[in-house]
Amino acid sequence: MIDGLLIGSVYGLAAMGLSLIWGVMDVINLTHGAVIALGMFGMYILFAAFPVNAYLLLLPVIAAGLLLGLVIYWIAVHWVIGRSQLSSLLSTFAVNMMIIGIGTAIWSTSPYNVNFTLRGFTVGAYTFDGNHLAAAGAAVIIGLALELFLYRTRPGKAIRAVADNREAAELMGISSTMVLALAFAIGIALAAASGALVSTLFPFTILSGAGYQMKSFVVTVLAGLGKPFGALVAGVLLGLLEGAVTPFIAVSWIPLIEFGLFVVVLVAFPKGIFTRATA
Amino acid sequence: MILRRPVFWLILVFAALMAFVPLRANNVSLREDLILVAIAIILASNLNLMIGYTGYVNFGHIVFYGLGGYIGLYLATVRNWNLVLAALASGLGVSLFALALGMGILRLRGAYFALATIGILVAVQSFVANFDPWGRSTGMYVAFDAYERLGGARHALWITYFLVIGVMALSMILSLGIKISKFGLGLFAIREDEDAALVLGVNTTVFKAIIYSVSAFLPAVAGALMFYKNGMIDPSIAFEFMLSLEGIVMLMLGGKGTVVGAALGAGLYEKLRSYLLTSPKFSNFQLVIAGGLLLLVVLFAPGGLIGWLYRLVPRARKVIE
Amino acid sequence: MTTLLEVSGVSKRFGGLQAVSDVSFSLGEREILGLIGPNGAGKTTLFNVVNGVYKADKGTVKFAGEDITNLPPNEVVHLGLARTHQIVKPLQDMTVLENVIVGACFGREYLALQPARKVALEVLERVGLAKSAEMSARSLTIAGKKRLEVARALAARPKLLLLDEVLAGLNPTEITYMIGIVRDIRDSGISVFMIEHVMQAIMSLSDRIVVLSFGQKLAEGQPEDVARDPQVIEAYLGDPDIAEKLKENN
């Protein structure tokens, strides 16, 4: 259960990236899973090159993620922003295919591992795994940083303005292209960061991102769009739910249950469970 | 009405060629190549009904094919049914399944629907992999002597080939028929603006459910035929996500929303694919190239090859549809 | 005069906002009923409740004697109530003719393709779009798109037509033309319920007017009387002499 709570914050982090992009530009980023996987491998490569505290390596991963986000934005998103949601769906999906394809060519589908362990501690009957704690801590810190960024800095406010009403924002002199690119880049960086964190917890393959993508979607619809911090909370809830359910059900059923949850929530609460309907 | 459309006759000629050329030449390897093309055309054409006509992207389209394969193979071997009946029954069964599913997930719009279809594919695959009567993750085999019913293995291969060509022709004719019908007009309205369509009197809920169900029928029949012919089925080959994706690439490449586009895209992509698979340099890059193609099409030529043709020669719209 | 549309005590709330509050009025055959009021008064919301896009929280809507309060929009059209949208919704990648055929196919008469085509061509002629029949809807000007919106609704052979700001965004010439179309529609036996901000037009077109403000009905009656109503002047018109001015201009 504790693990569930801790892992849940990483789910939340992953979902934050998805939710931000979705909320700001109404684009469903189907490269999400592939980027998470890249984050995993990114951490692997960095750790192999620089055997320091893996959690410090999070920073270069985030930086790389921002760059990657800008690239993906220019390739797949910028040209289809005005068009139907379907176009961006297909274009991001196409990029997903390409990333997975290249990744498979480089790393095949074999499992990889980041062999870094932080010592945990035990309090009474509860064991706190060191890596889990660090991952959760990192997720929360990044989440808070995002909140601060969105609410206290100019670029952050610009992002929220564009999310609210793109035309009005442009009329006020905000370059929506740059803002969208920035928001997208941040979303990707968050996904990469979550992947990097996961890599310290479990073994992974190039295909592992898909499962986390599904979880991100579930969390995002639970929290409602464009509410990054809400995504963190919903992520924790999902983690707790998984923790509660795992002892009783075979692991292979979990993606199914999550998918079922996804559909049910979408059909029953189109705007997310935590949002109030507006006019 | 449909008989007046040149494309109708084009389809018949095309199917006839596909059927008789390998037969005449008694060329088995050509036949094996062409059956893959035919399956691709079946999948792309039926997918077109959802993506091209109605504007709903079905990422998990292959689930109908795989499920049809399972039901068909089960009925034909374990229950010893006549192959044609088994195939039809699987088509019907999968259509009904799609109808039930559709009532749930078709309420979701655009991207949500697309995501839900992926989930369905994953869900069905998981379920089948745990389903005892269908062999769980090992799947099922066709005992060799089952082909004796069709006059021996070699004969059976030709028979299934013709049946698949038949299903291919039906898929294209179905596409055409819907396109020129009032039902098709309603679908197009839904695609353009679902809210407007509703206000104009289109019963969007029912129309969507029907087309989703219909788009499942022929792929399921084809699945039954193909897996029977191949002699085996298991959850990983029945529900290959890659095939679903390729269906989308083929359709976008050829030109979604058109009858010919689906066939053109399928044919071209199959050729590309077989080249990639045999070439040592590119076999790993199948996914990358497919993704790259899809990206290029979506960004620069959303109407695909046929769409590009329409822009070059506007009058072609009337003849090649 | 027989009552065609009867709206009784309709209310609609969205979260914290009471968009429409206990609104009642009726509309008869061969009548043009105008609906005016400041922005945000709930006019379009009222339209949406009448044709089934929104479900009323309270109240009923009766059309030609039938209770249509909870009917979905596609069934409302089948009974003979068609509407246009404030922000036009053309079926972009279909031709003008195809757009109107959709209206005829799925409207009150639910025609087959061939007869629908005939009706569509007639309607296009009526609104002056016959020459653009084969153009894609996307390529029309805003005036053209507005006319297409009306044509599509007309093709459904309605008994009542809801027009939502059909004059917005048009230049004076286009407005005059559209006014002619609306009068023509009423004269052909179809009732019209229209939201408009172009005061001159709505005052001269309407047989009666309903005024909405903050979701409530402020006034109802003949255009001249409504224009003189002090509450209406304060809430919306601003100019107490507007009735006189409009009469002079006419």
Image (spheres, coloured by chain):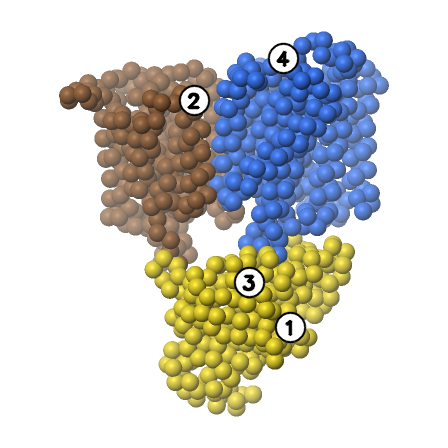
Chain colours: A brown, B blue, C yellow
Of helix, strand and loop, which one carries label 2? helix
Chain designation of label 1: C
**Which sits in the foreground, A115 or C38?**
C38
Q: Which residue is the site of mark 1?
A: C190
Q: Which residue is the site of mark 4?
A: B141
Badges 1 and 4, same chain: no
Q: Quadrant of residue A50?
A: top left
Q: Kindly identify the residue that appears in the image at 52 percent across and 90 percent down.
A: C248
Q: Please state which amino acid type lies under the numbered disc 1.
A: Ile
| Number of numbered discs visible in the structure rendering | 4
**Which sits in the foreground, B115 or B297?**
B115
Q: Kindly identify the residue that appears in the image at 62 percent across and 31 percent down.
A: B94
Near mark 3 (Cα within 10 A), the count class, few <14, some 14-19 or many ≥20, is many
Of helix, strand and loop, which one carries label 1? loop
Chain designation of label 4: B
Could you tell me if residue C145 is visible in this image? no
Q: Which residue is the site of mark 3?
A: C68
Where B224 sits versus B190, above or below?
A: above
Of helix, strand and loop, which one carries label 3? loop
Where B28 sits versus C53, above or below?
A: above
Foreground mark, 3 or 4, reads 3
Q: Label 3 to label 2, Cα distance in Å?
A: 49 Å
Q: Quadrant of residue C32?
A: bottom right
